[in-house]
Image: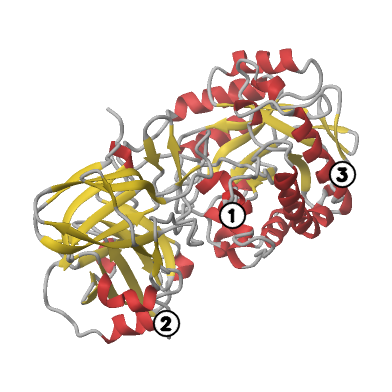
Amino acid sequence: MRFMIGADHFELDGQPHRILAGALHYFRVHPDQWADRIHKARLMGLNTIETYVAWNAHEAQPGIFDFTAGLDLGRFLDLVHAEGMHAIVRPGPYICAEWWNGGLPPWLFADGTVGIRRNEPQFLEAVRRYLDALAPILVPRQIDAGGPIVLVQIENEYGAYGDDHDYLRALVAMHRDIGLTVPFTTVDQPIDAMLDDGSLPELHKTGSFGSRVEERLARLRQAQPTGPLMCSEFWDGWFDSWGAHHHTTSVAESARELDTLLAAGASVNIYMFHGGTNFGFTNGANDKGVYRPIATSYDYDAPLDEAGNPTPKFDAFREVIARYAPVPSEPLIRTATTAPAALPPICFDRALPLHTLLPHLTTFTAHDRVPTMDDLGAATGFILYRTEVELSAPAVLHIGEVRDRAQLFLDGAAVAILEREHHDHAVTLPAVGRATLELLVEDQGRVNYGPRIGEPKGLIGPITLDGRPLARWSAAPLRLEGAFDAGAPAGELLRSAAADPATTIAGPAVALATVRLQTVPQEVHLALDGFGKGVAWVNGFCLGRYWSRGPQRTLYVPSPLLHSGDNEVIVFEQHASPTRCGAFVAAADLGHLEE
C-alpha cells in the first residue's frame, strides 16, 4: 500500500483518506495493557495510533539501547497493526510530552559543549546513532512494506524553540538515510511565526491546538495553501502539576471543537486518547520563572482514563466521529471495578530508617567541591550530601540553587527543607557545636520545555556557611532501581526486619507491607492517606511519586503487576506518617478541581 500527501487530502492507495488518530505513549502504559488500549481506540472510531519515541528511555547510556519489555516499540507497533490500524511515529529527537528532559538523554549535556536542537556536529552524531538504532524497528513497519506506519514527524514544535532550518534539513536527510520513505510532517502552534520557523517547504505542516478551531485552521491554511489540513495535537485535556489543581475540560466544548475540526475536512490526532502514568521518576517539569514538577498521573482528562476506562469524552467523541466516518458496532466491554471492601488492608509492618539501608543503596565519594547528580552519573532520583560543620553560634547556610528539594539534617535530626519551587536558598542552622550536616536532595523531574532543558540536578554551588565556602563534601546517589527485589541486599534486610507494632513511620525510611489477594482486581489504585512524600513500589515495579501536597491522592496500579497470593508494597517515605496503613481502592482520586 502507498500513503501520500495529495493536493487536498491524504491519499491511501490513491484514494482520499482522513486520519483519525489518538495519542497513546507506549512508555506510559504497562506493556500487558497495550493491546487493550489500542483496541478501545478503534472502538471509539479511530483508525490510527500516534506515539512519541522517548530517546532517553531507550539510550540511558551512550550507545547502549534498550527496546525490551515496556520499551519494545516494535511489539507496540505490531499490536497497532494487528488491530487493523495505522501508526504515526514521532521520534523527536525532542518530544516535550511532559516527559523528563523532553526525551533528551542527560548525558548529552555532560560536558556543556553539545549544541542541543541545532545544526551542531556532536548533537547530530548522537541523533544519527539513535536513528540508526530505530531503523530496524521503523523501516520494515512502514505501510509500503506492509506495516502500519503512515507518517513520521520531524522534531516537535520546533518553531517555539528555534528557527535553524539547516538543523531541520539535517534531520530530514538522516531520517531518509535510514530508509524511511513515508511522508514527513512537522507540528507547531499556528500562531506568530512558529509554523514558518518550525518547518521547511518540503515538510507538511500540521497544527497543535484544542480550541478556536476555525481561526487556527485558517492560520494553518495561510501558512500552507495546499495539502490536507491536520491538527496533530488536538488538546482534549491537560496535565497536572504537584501543588496545583486537577485539570479537566468541558466534554461538550471538546466535542464541539472536534466536530468543527472534522466538519472542515481536517484530519486529527487526539492528544491524548489515553494518557497513562509517569511511572518511576519519568515525570517532567516546567520552569517559566517558577519550577513546577509534573504529577505522577498523566490522566489528561482523556477519553480513556488512567486505568483504561472510558470517560464521558469517549462516548461524546465517538458520537462526533460517527458523523464523518464508520464507527465499529462492536460494544465496548466496560471494566468492572472491585469494591474496596473486597480488598485486604495494607499494613506496613516492617520499616527501616534510610541510614540503616544506606550501605546497600550507595557508596559515598569524596569531593573538594559539591558535585551535581550529573557529575556522579545519576540521571534521576535522590542524592545524599554530607559535610562536617562547626556551629558554635547560629549560622546561615546559603546554596546557589537547590534542584529540586533538599531535606537538611544535623547529626540525623531534621532541621529544614529548601525547595526550588519556593526559590529557597538560605536557612539558619542552630548552634549545636560540631555536627554532620546532611542534605537529602530529590530530583523532582527534569524540565521538559524551554531553555532549562538539560540543566544538572542536585546542589548547585557555591555553598557557604556565614559567607565562608564549605568544602570537603561526600556525596552518594541512591540506587533505588531493583534495590528491594528478591535477593537484593537492601530488600532482604527489609524483609528480615522485625514486625513493628508502632503506628508511625519516622522518615526518611523504607517500609514494607505484604498483601495477600485471593483474586486479582481488574482495576486498583494505591491510597496512602496520612503519608507525606515519597515513592511507592508494587512487586518491584515503581509506581512513581506520591505527595500529600496533591492534587492526586492515589497511585494507579496496573493489574498485571498483581497476582493471587502474597504481593509486596514498599514505600520510601521521606518525611513521616502517623499511620502505617494504606489501602487498595477501586477508584482514582486525582484531586480537587479549579473552582
The kind of residue tagged 2 is: Ala
Residue 64, by quadrant, is bottom right
Q: In this view, does 414 lie above or below 171?
A: below
Label total for image? 3
Query: In the rendering, which numbered label is found on residue 107?
Result: 1
Q: Position of residue 493 (x, y in %)?
A: 31, 84
Q: Position of residue 384 (x, y in %)?
A: 33, 62
Query: In the rendering, which numbered label is found on residue 227?
Result: none
Rounded to the nearest angstrom, the CA distance separating label 2 from label 3 is 47 Å
The kind of residue tagged 1 is: Trp
Q: Where is residue 25 in the image (x, y as percent from the top left)?
A: 58, 50
* Discs 1/3, front: 1
Residue 134, by quadrant, is bottom right
Rounded to the nearest angstrom, the CA distance separating label 1 from label 2 is 27 Å
Q: Is residue 491 left or right of residue 217?
A: left
110 or 302: nearer the viewer: 110
User: Which quadrant of the figure contains the C terminus?
Assistant: top left
Q: Is residue 17 left or right of residue 358?
A: right
Q: In this view, does 454 lie above or below 524?
A: above
Mark with earlier residue (1, 2): 1
* Discs 2/3, front: 2
Q: Is residue 587 left or right of residue 581?
A: right
Q: Is residue 353 above or below residue 458?
A: below
Q: Name the residue under label 2.
A: 488
292 or 435: nearer the viewer: 435
Mark with earlier residue (1, 3): 1
The kind of residue tagged 3 is: Thr
* Discs 1/2, front: 1
Asked whether the beta carbons under mark 1 and mark 3 sit within 8 Å of each other, the answer is: no
